[in-house]
Amino acid sequence: MTEFGGRLKRHATASGLTRHLVRIVSALAKTGFWLAAYHYYGPKAFLYVSAAWLLALGAKDLTFWRIRLRRLHRPTQRTQALWLSIWLELGLLAVRLALTFGLSLLIGLFSPTVASVLVGLMLCTIFWSRETLNNLMRVYEVGALRIYIVMLGAIAGIGTIIACAETGRTAIVAAVAGLVVREAVQFFGMTLIVIAGRFGLRAPGDDVDEDEGGAEESVAVSGGREVRSTWKLLIADNIVWSRWRLIQFGTRYAATGLLGPFGGFASRMLFSYRKPGAYKHRETRLSAWKIAGMALLGATSLTVLIMVAARWGLIHALGLTLAASVFRLVAIVANTLLWRQLSPLVGMEGKIPSPIPQALRRKA
């Protein structure tokens, strides 16, 4: 027994070391992607691509909706929950595509180059729709393999942009190809893992993804009453994770501004190991005056940045990137406020009416 226990302990230590290395490689590859873009194509192209990527991420953040359905873990209700999850994802996908396309038309008035990159990045929007896959990875107990898929995607992304640069492709083609390949590898890799899990593969564990989070936690409201309603749990889950994404955004950009690429790498590593706190219920909504004040402050900041960029002749590069950064910040704040305003519903007595049309629920 002592020998067996020693082998088990050594195996656990080796496995833990491997996972640490995988996280480090993933963070390095993601940071290295942007360093490669800067190295091969220069600061101007780097800023244009960065602006387009920030706009695409802003569209994602504005419509961020984590869909964690506990019924997927119940075999008798799995089919219904699976259909519901798919319908919700398709709805979010349609909204994101429309929003991203609208942003490309608007930004095209200032920079056709950024608009072209943004149109190409609409393909990434399709591969971001993987909430159902996240859920199924937990159902089939293969969630621990997520970090390996993320690493492969990050390596494929940086490999693609380097290959494109070495073969003479333009900055737009290289950047779009690299980002799309990165997201596609993650999407299809997760799909293959889910299929393998369906046929018996098991890898217990549920690693937290720095962008998408981990499993849904239990929720309690006033008096210690546990919440069981699907929609109330969904709201509570999104309250926690939308706030956590806002913290990530602020930390990452502050670290990058102070320490450059090293700061970006360090912040990615930090959020690969940390998780948000538990849900804290609030019975009251934020006042309209506070929301209006935040909106006014954000609009004023954006206006000042645009005016300064125009005065310095940077509206087509640095100005656009700054404006895109502010847009993403506004998107994250707006999404966080939306879920925060729904917080009183979590403690409400009775069920929340389903937002899914009756016809679709019958089909599910």
Image: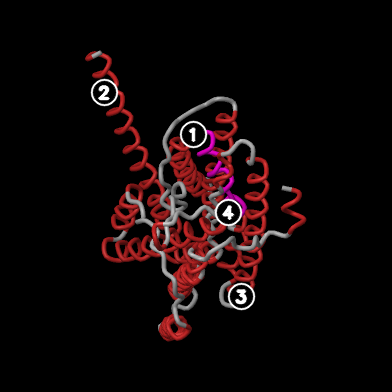
x, y percent for residue 49? 50, 62
Image position of 42 with respect to 183: above or below: below
Q: Position of residue 83 (x, y in %)?
A: 68, 47
Is label 2 or label 3 in front?
Answer: 2
Q: Which residue is mark 2?
A: 10
Quadrant occupied by the N terminus: top left
Instruction: Report the amino acid beneath label 4.
Output: Cys
Real-space Cα distance between discs 4 and 3?
Answer: 19 Å
Q: Which residue is mark 4?
A: 124
Q: Residues within 10 Å of mark 1 (few under 14, many from 20)?
A: many
Q: Left or right of 277: which side holds 100? A: right
Kind of residue at badge 1:
Val
Q: Quadrant of residue 109?
A: bottom right
Which secondary structure lies at badge 1?
loop
The residue stretch that appears in magenta: 126-141
Which dot, 1 or 4, sits closer to the camera?
Answer: 1
* Label 4 close to label 3 by CB (< 8 Å): no
Residue 329 point in image, percent of width and height: 44, 70
User: Could you classify mark 4 by the number of other residues whose Cα lies within 10 Å: few (under 14), some (14-19), or many (20 or more)?
Assistant: many
Looking at the image, is mark 4 or mark 3 earlier in the sequence? 3
